[in-house]
Amino acid sequence: MPSTSPSTTAPTTATVLPGRAAPESAATSPHAYDAGLLLLRLALGLTMAAHGSQKLFGWFGGGGLDGTGQFFTMSGYPAGDAMAVVAGLTETFGGLALAVGLLTPLAAAAILGTMVNALAVTWGGGFFAPKGSEYELLLIAGAAALALTGPGRYAVDRFLPVLRAHRLAYGAAAVVVGLVTAGVILLLRK
């Protein structure tokens, strides 16, 4: 005899083919996800660009190339002036690219690699500011998260055919590139 009670079986889900978006439910808003990624990109990217401009131009109370070069030399890096230029350019242009969502995996890798080196300098001072490493760890995590998730819809990458559909492999490769580059630079440090 057939049952008259409501079905207790789970509703079927649609199969999602690779490269296709999952069907949206009424409770899910892709725009909220994309707006959140935009906010994260802007906060992280513009913060890093401001730090880079401190190094390159002395803006926002920064030391400029001379002061930053001296800091790098005191921190054990060879060719402190050259390292100041590299760090300043990486932070400024990596940050701006991340903010607008241009080549997001590579921009995130640039920030990640730079911040791993900053973490090495602050390591040993505890976790909390002013001498701790909480700030650097947060920036590293944010950069890695953006590399892995992609920039969202509100990004220049949406207009680039290769990066239009972000792939986890792009983000994972970018994280590896950032970590390997940071490791090579750290090997040069005394």
Image (cartoon, rainbow, N blue to C red):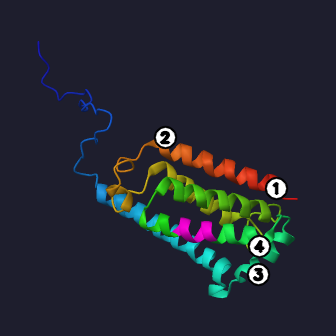
Q: Residue at x 86, y 64 (%)?
A: 76
Q: Which mark is residue 81?
A: 4
Q: Which mark is residue 64?
A: none
**CA–CA distance in space, label 3 to label 1:** 20 Å
Q: Quadrant of the C terminus?
A: bottom right
Earlier along the polypeptide chain: callout 1 or callout 4? 4
Earlier along the polypeptide chain: callout 3 or callout 1? 3
Q: Which residue is mark 3?
A: 66
Q: Tell whether 91 sits left or right of 27.
A: right
Magenta stretch?
A: 89-95
Q: Please tell me whether residue 91 belongs to the stretch shown in magenta.
A: yes
Amino acid at pointer 2: Ala
Earlier along the polypeptide chain: callout 2 or callout 3? 3
Mark 1 neighbour class, 10 Å CA radius: few under 14, some 14 to 19, many 20 or more: few
Q: Nearer the viewer, mark 1 or mark 2?
A: 1
Q: Which residue is mark 2?
A: 169
Q: Secondary structure at mark 4?
A: helix
Asked if the residues shown at circle 3 and circle 4 are in contact, with their CB atoms under 8 angstroms apart, the answer is yes
State which quadrant residue 111 falls in. bottom right
**CA–CA distance in space, label 4 to label 2:** 35 Å
Q: Position of residue 162 (x, y in %)?
A: 38, 47
Q: Which residue is mark 1?
A: 188
Earlier along the polypeptide chain: callout 3 or callout 4? 3
Q: Position of residue 52 (x, y in %)?
A: 62, 74
Amino acid at pointer 1: Leu
Q: Secondary structure at mark 1?
A: helix
Asked if the residues shown at circle 1 and circle 2 are in contact, with their CB atoms under 8 angstroms apart, the answer is no
Mark 4 neighbour class, 10 Å CA radius: few under 14, some 14 to 19, many 20 or more: some
The prevailing secondary structure element of the residues shown in magenta is helix
Judge whether 7 appears above or below 166 on screen.
above
Q: Secondary structure at mark 3?
A: helix
Number of marks = 4
